[in-house]
Image (tube, helix red, strand yellow):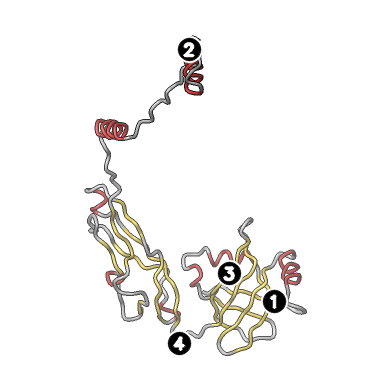
Amino acid sequence: MPEVVVAKPREGKFNKNAARRVRVAGKIPAVLYGSGLEPVAVEVDPKQISRILFSESGHNTIFDVEVAGHAAAKAMIVDWQREPIKDQLIHIDLKRIALDKALRVKVRVKLLGIPVGVKAAGGILDQVLREVEIECLPGDIPHHIDVDVSNLELFASLRVKDLPHSGSLKFLNAEDATVAHVVSIREEVVPVAEVDAAAAAAAAAAPTTAEPEVAKKGKPEAEGAAKKADPGAGAKK
């Protein structure tokens, strides 16, 4: 049985102060739109919305939304905002959906097993795409897409085309897009002897700075300077 979200219409001005008052009262400001109907500003219970977001189907959960004065409708959470410091929900967008019309949604990819390239070759499994975008009817949205990676060898890749396909799902990502691959984490270690030899070679190649010559001080230098200035100085008369 789908969960029922009871949303209370918001009245008055829709600005930051009004939204702050809604949050102070323990609710979350939200907007309900879609199906060709006018958007409705509402407030909802944050605990209920968090429970939906953290469920197995997450933001792809389909639930009933009831707003006083409006017809009940099927809806999904299509966007949400969190306060970065306290990590609290501060706003959400709810979208009415029709069960007979296809939707575009993102679904988590769940990798199963340990690749042989990890167990036997010392590699590491790197998941590149954690979600893929699909198109399907609301009732066909999977909670997640499971894929076995046990046979994935070192340097081998799992691509979108390798995911389990069915007639009810249409993948919108490129078929050759990498979902996961097994990579090597080994680094080349340079032997200590080679490091020492390289350091010695670098030191030998470095230019040397000659120590400046220290000029001699004293009488001989003074006399030499005087003779140069006056060649007749010091001669006997």
Q: How many marks?
A: 4
Q: Give residue 222's position: percent from left, percent from top.
A: 51, 17
In space, the residues marked 3 and 1 are separated at their CA atoms by 18 Å
Q: Give residue 220's position: percent from left, percent from top.
A: 47, 13
User: SS at mark 3?
Assistant: strand
Q: Earlier in the sequence, mark 1 or mark 4?
A: 1
Pointer 1 residue? 8
Amino acid under disc 4: Asp
Q: On residue 80, which mark appears?
A: 3
In the rendered view, does 220 fall on the left or right side of 114?
A: right
User: SS at mark 4?
Assistant: loop
Pointer 4 residue? 100
Q: Earlier in the sequence, mark 3 or mark 1?
A: 1
Pointer 2 residue? 235
| 3 and 4 marks in contact (CB < 8 Å) | no
- At x 68%, y 73%, the residue is 43
In the rendered view, does 180 fall on the left or right side of 81?
A: left
